[in-house]
C-alpha cells in the first residue's frame, strides 16, 4: 500500500527545504524553539486555527494531532525570546522564495490585459503600551500596507507601520514599470499620478466626486449587453484635472451601481470601458484577503507587541497563505480520478443550465467576470468552511477521498 503523506505534511512540504537552508546559516541555534521549530509551530498555529500562543502551548501538551506533527511544547516567555532572537529578514526571505518557487495558477484572460497589483492598507488594533503604534490620542493601531497580485490572487509585498503610516508612500516605494496599480480614493494625489506615469507604470484609481475636470474628448462605451442591468449612466472621457499643475491627460470613467456613483481615473488608454470597470471591481479581492487573515487567521490577536515581532507574525501569515493556496491548487491538479472528473463535468453542466434558465445573474455573465465567478471559489478563495474542513483533516492521509472532500468546499 502506498505510504501517503498527511494533509499537514503536504501543506508544509515546500517550506521544509527552505527552512533547512536558513537554519544552516545560523551559527548557534540549539534553542528549544530553534528557527525550524519556532517557524513550524507558528505555521501549525495558523493552519489549525489556534487563536493564541497560550492555546498553542495547550495544544502541544494535550493534542494528539499537534504532537503527531511535531509541535514543540514551549512557554510564552520562550516565544517572546524567539521573536526577539530571530531577524524578520529570515521570514522575508522565506516568503519571497516561496513566492518565486511555487507555481501559482494565474488567470490567462487577465494576463492578456497586463499585470495588475491591488494596493490598500488595513488597521489592526494595538494595546496602549505599544507606543510606537501611534494612531489616535485615545488609541493605538498598526497598519498593514499590502500589495496583492490580482493575476494570481496572492500577496506579493507588504510593510507594517504605525496606524498613521502613509499609504501613498508604500505605493511610491513599490512602483514597477509596466504594472497597473488598482486602488481606492486614499491614493489620490496628482504628484503620485505623475510619478506612476514617469516610471512607465499605470493606475486605475477611484477619485473623489468633487474633483473638477476639463473634458478633452469622449470615448464610445462599448459595453456587454447584460451590463445594462447592473450599471447606469456610464461615461468615458479623456480629461485633465483642473487642480493638476502637471496638466497630464488621463481617462475618467463614471458609472452608477446600486445607487452609488463611481469615478475611475486611469492612464490605461488601451483598455475598453468595461475592462476598466471590471478591473476596479476586483479591487474587492484585497478586502477579502484582509478579512481572511483577520477572521480566519486570527491576526487581530497579536503574538508580539514589538514592531520586530509583529513583522515576523505578518510574514508568517503571508507564508501560510501561500502554502495553503498552493495546496488548494495542487488538490485541483490531483483531482484526476474518473469520479472527480465526472463530478466536475456535472457541476459545470448544472451551472450552464442555471445560467440559461435565469438569463440575468448578479455578476455580468461575460468574459473574465464569468470566469472568475465560476473558478474563484475552487482555485483561489480561502473560505472559513474550507479552512475548517482542512483543520479537521490535517492528520488524514492525502487520499483521493480526502482530496474530493476538500475540493467540495
Image: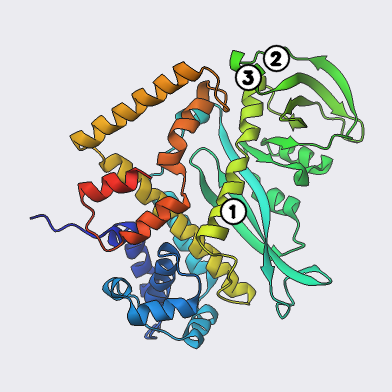
Secondary structure of residue under mark 1: helix
The relative height of residue 56 versus residue 399 in the rendered view (above or below) is below
Q: Image quarter for residue 329?
A: top left
Which is closer to the viewer, label 2 or label 3? Answer: 3
Where residue 380 appears, as percent x and y from the top left, is: 45, 43
Secondary structure of residue under mark 3: helix
For residue 187, side relative to residue 176 (left or right): right
Residues 214 and 28: in front is 214
Which is closer to the viewer, label 2 or label 1? Answer: 1
Where residue 66 appears, as percent x and y from the top left, is: 33, 73
The relative height of residue 266 versus residue 383 in the rendered view (above or below) is above
Q: Which residue is mark 3?
A: 227
Q: Is residue 139 visible?
A: yes
Q: Which residue is mark 2?
A: 221
Q: Which residue is pictured at 28% across the width and 75% down the height?
A: 64
Query: In the orientation shown, which residue stands out farthest toward the front?
Result: 357
User: Colour scheme of this structure image?
Assistant: rainbow
Residue contact at pointers 2 and 3, CB within 8 angstroms: no
The relative height of residue 49 versus residue 212 in the rendered view (above or below) is below
Residues 158 and 209: in front is 209
For the residue carrying disc 1, how many other residues have a C-alpha within 10 Å: few (<14), some (14-19), or many (20+)?
some
Amino acid at each position: 500500500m502506498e505510504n501517503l503523506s498527511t494533509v499537514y505534511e503536504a501543506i508544509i512540504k515546500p517550506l521544509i527545504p527552505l527552512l533547512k537552508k536558513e537554519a544552516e546559516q545560523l551559527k548557534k541555534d540549539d534553542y528549544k524553539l530553534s528557527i525550524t521549530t519556532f517557524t513550524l509551530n507558528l505555521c501549525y498555529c495558523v493552519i489549525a486555527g489556534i487563536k493564541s500562543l497560550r492555546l498553542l502551548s495547550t495544544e502541544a501538551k494535550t493534542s494528539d494531532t499537534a504532537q503527531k506533527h511535531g509541535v514543540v511544547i514551549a512557554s510564552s516567555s520562550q516565544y517572546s525570546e524567539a521573536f526577539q532572537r530571530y531577524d524578520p529578514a529570515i521570514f522575508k526571505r522565506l516568503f519571497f522564495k516561496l513566492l518565486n518557487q511555487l507555481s501559482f495558477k494565474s488567470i490567462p484572460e487577465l494576463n492578456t490585459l497586463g499585470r495588475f497589483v491591488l494596493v490598500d492598507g488595513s488597521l489592526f488594533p494595538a494595546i496602549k503600551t505599544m507606543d510606537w503604534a501611534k494612531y489616535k490620542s485615545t488609541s493605538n493601531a498598526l497598519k498593514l500596507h499590502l500589495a496583492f497580485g490580482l493575476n494570481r490572487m496572492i500577496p506579493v509585498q507588504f510593510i507594517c507601520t504605525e496606524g498613521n503610516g502613509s499609504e501613498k508612500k508604500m505605493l511610491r516605494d513599490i512602483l514597477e514599470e509596466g504594472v497597473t496599480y488598482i486602488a481606492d480614493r486614499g491614493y489620490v494625489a496628482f504628484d503620485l499620478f505623475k510619478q506612476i506615469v514617469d516610471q512607465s507604470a499605470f493606475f486605475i484609481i477611484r477619485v473623489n466626486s468633487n474633483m473638477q475636470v476639463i473634458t478633452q474628448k469622449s470615448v464610445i462605451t462599448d459595453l456587454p449587453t447584460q451590463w445594462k442591468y447592473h450599471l447606469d449612466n456610464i461615461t468615458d472621457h479623456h480629461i485633465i484635472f483642473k487642480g493638476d499643475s502637471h496638466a497630464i491627460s488621463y481617462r475618467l470613467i463614471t458609472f452608477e451601481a446600486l445607487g452609488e456613483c463611481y469615478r475611475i481615473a486611469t492612464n490605461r488608454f488601451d483598455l475598453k470601458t468595461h475592462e476598466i470597470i471590471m478591473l476596479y471591481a476586483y479591487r474587492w479581492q484585497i478586502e477579502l484577503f484582509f478579512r481572511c487573515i483577520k477572521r480566519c487567521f486570527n491576526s487581530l490577536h497579536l503574538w508580539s507587541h514589538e514592531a520586530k515581532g509583529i513583522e515576523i507574525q505578518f510574514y508568517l501569515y503571508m507564508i501560510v497563505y501561500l502554502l495553503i493556496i498552493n495546496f488548494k491548487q495542487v488538490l485541483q491538479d490531483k483531482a484526476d480520478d474518473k469520479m472527480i472528473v465526472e463530478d466536475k463535468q456535472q457541476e459545470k453542466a448544472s451551472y450552464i443550465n442555471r445560467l440559461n434558465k435565469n438569463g440575468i445573474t448578479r455578476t455580468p455573465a461575460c468574459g473574465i467576470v464569468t470566469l472568475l465567478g465560476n473558478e474563484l471559489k475552487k482555485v483561489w478563495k480561502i473560505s472559513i468552511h474550507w479552512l475548517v474542513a482542512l483543520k479537521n483533516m490535517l492528520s488524514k492521509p492525502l487520499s483521493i477521498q480526502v482530496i474530493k472532500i476538500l475540493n467540495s468546499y
